[in-house]
């Protein structure tokens, strides 16, 4: 898998997103579209950004009964995104149905990535709210194994988990890691962070970077710095 930097376009409107992307005149970054922008603007925002030549990670984290997820994924596959995701906690049956729905008639499909446990969930909330008594690190690895077993392409995980995921699920099982900050940057609300070069050393395949690029005084330079440190270009 080729390493790449994915910019989290966490903007509330099409105007703000396109104004941001307009700054990139000599490159076409891989972008992540999340729930906020997708629910505000609908599928047309995906088509418009795709038509501009960007790769897209559509981060909608599906979780429902298998049949519903399968049908929703079939709709998403027509949007021609490059990567999308779901919750591994929806079970192996749901993940299998998602893969079926996402696969186009010609056999191609976007990469399908699983969320294991959200980083906003901790051991205490998992035990008290979800009644899961296992160690959270074991739960994350178990969900990653389930995703691998049914044929998904990888998981979203903290950079600190990427190495373990590769050890357990193989090098070609993709790790997509948020929580990336420049060594001299502001951590914001991310608690456990890594620099782009550290993320490269531990074997992340894709880093998802939002505010260090979107809020930078020169976003294009911040993106290029990220690429230099993570990909080496
Ligand atoms: O601005 P920042 O670089 O923190 O943005 C990171 C992006 O990755 C956001 O879109 C955030 O929702 C997402 N994300 C995360 N942690 C996770 C999963 C997704 O920060 N565990």
Image (cartoon, grey):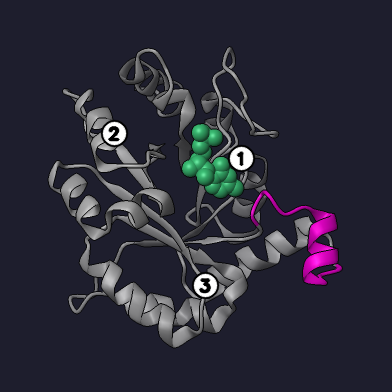
Of labels 1 and 3, the one closer to you: 3
Q: Earlier in the sequence, mark 2 or mark 1?
A: 2
Q: Which residue is mark 2?
A: 16
Q: Which residue is mark 3?
A: 63
Quadrant in the picture for residue 24? top left
Magenta part of the protein: which range? 118-133
Distance (Cα) linking label 3 and label 2: 29 Å
User: Which residue, as the protein is rendered here, is positioned at the far left?
Assistant: 51
Residue depicted at x 86% and y 68%:
133
Residue depicted at x 46% and y 21%:
229
Of labels 2 and 1, the one closer to you: 2
Residue 177 seen from this side: no
Q: Earlier in the sequence, mark 3 or mark 2?
A: 2
Q: Quadrant of the C terminus?
A: top left
Above or below residue 104? Residue 6 is: above
Quadrant in the picture for residue 11? top left
Dot 1: element: helix
- Foreground of the two, 61 or 19: 19
């Amino acid at each position: 898998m080729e390493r790449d930097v994915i910019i989290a376009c966490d903007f509330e409107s099409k105007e703000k997103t396109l104004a941001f992307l307009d700054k990139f005149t000599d490159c076409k970054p891989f972008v992540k579209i999340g729930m906020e922008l997708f629910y505000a603007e609908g599928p047309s925002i995906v088509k418009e950004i795709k038509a501009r030549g960007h790769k897209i990670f559509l981060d909608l984290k599906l979780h429902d009964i298998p049949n519903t997820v399968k049908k929703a994924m079939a709709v998403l596959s027509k949007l021609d995104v490059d990567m999308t995701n779901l919750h591994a906690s929806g079970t192996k049956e749901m993940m299998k149905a998602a893969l079926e729905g996402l696969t186009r008639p010609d056999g191609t499909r976007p990469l399908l990535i699983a969320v294991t446990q959200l980083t906003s969930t901790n051991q205490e909330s998992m035990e008290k709210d979800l009644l899961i008594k296992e160690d959270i690190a074991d739960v994350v690895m178990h969900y990653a194994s389930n995703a691998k077993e049914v044929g998904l392409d990888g998981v979203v995980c903290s950079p600190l988990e990427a190495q373990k995921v590769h050890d357990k699920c193989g090098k070609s099982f993709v790790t997509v890691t948020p929580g990336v900050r420049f060594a001299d940057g502001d951590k914001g609300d991310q608690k456990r962070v890594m620099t782009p070069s550290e993320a490269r050393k531990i074997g992340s395949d894709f880093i998802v970077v939002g505010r260090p690029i979107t809020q930078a005084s020169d976003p294009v330079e911040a993106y290029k710095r990220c690429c230099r440190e993570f990909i080496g270009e």
